[in-house]
Image (cartoon, rainbow, N blue to C red):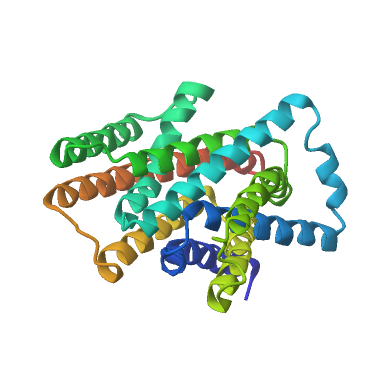
Amino acid sequence: MNERKRALLAMILACVIWGLSPLYYKLLAHIAPIEVLAHRTIWSATLFAGLLMVQGRQRELAHVGRPLKQGAAVLIAALLISTNWFVFISAVGSDQATEASMGYFLFPLVSVLLGRVVLGERQSTAQWLAVGLAGLAVLVLTVGLGVAPWIALILSGTFGLYGLLKKRLPLGPVVSVTAEVLLLCPIAILVLWHFHSSGGGVFGQSLQDSVLLVFSGALTATPLILFSRAARQLPLSTVGLMQYLNPTLQFLCAVVIFAEPFSLWHMIAFPMIWAALALYSLSSWRQEKVASRTSVAPATSSTT
């Protein structure tokens, strides 16, 4: 198997793990989301820190906080990703995984908007139409259900801002995430101390729950490592399209396995979002194709 096929397999596996993660968190629905989050943070930190030590890269963590501006960015990123994790865990546990999947469908389009507003990036007319269509879908759902899809908006917003910060951080993905979860560990420890001191802590009370909570570290680390390695080998368009496998599987888990309600308004809004994603992906693919042609053209002409 060549490197490209291995990278593609790693990307598929990462997206499948993310997409099927609602099945795991559903098993922990009887536990307070904040307690699950605390365990996810601690066991992720343990695994990531151990990985860096095995690689002999632990010294890289000492430079994460310098300069101070970079350290502040890592702290904000940590707060954003922990908020994202908490909302997702809560959504699955409260039978709102359908709306959570919508958040990850919306994420690429939120990134387009943030790229324009914050970074001044230029988008094509088709990409702006995609953003507008997704916005219209959210409006339809808000009017139809009488309430905005806050879970989807928070998930897409926090993940979009998280991605924006990570784009500007000169740190590798493993080092960055390790620093983030380590920063969150003191809060996680306080949360678990509160639960256990009041006699309500789950860890140690049930073997199944304890194993599942420990496993949250691997569930967090494995797909991220697979994704970061695969992204280096695959074209950006391939990476972007493959990521839609994640919310698609989440959506199927919610509707098919969890049998969550799927109203007429969802039937209208979701196809609008899918159409927006198709339009956005097609436009991005065309742009990348044109860019690759123009970069090859000078080299070709110089050899003839």
Q: Residue at x 71, y 62 (%)?
A: 47
Most foreground residue, 184 or 295: 184
Across and down, in percent, residue 123 comes to 41, 29
- Tell me if residue 2 comes above or below residue 133 in the rendering: below
Q: Quarter of the image containing the C terminus? A: top right
Along the line of sight, the residue nearer the viewer: 90 or 173: 90
Query: Residue 179: x, y in percent?
Result: 72, 45
Quadrant in which the N terminus appears: bottom right
At a point 46% along the width and 50% down the height, the residue shown is 240
- Which residue occupies the extreme front position in the image? 198
The quarter of the picture where residue 247 lies is: bottom left
Residue 10 image position (x, y, % from top left): 57, 66
Q: Is residue 225 left or right of residue 235?
A: right
Residue at 62% across, 64% down: 222
Q: Is residue 272 left or right of residue 218?
A: left
Closer to the camera in the image, 180 or 8? 180
| Residue drawn 67% across the image and 36% down it | 74
Relative placement, left or right, of 220 versus 143 is right
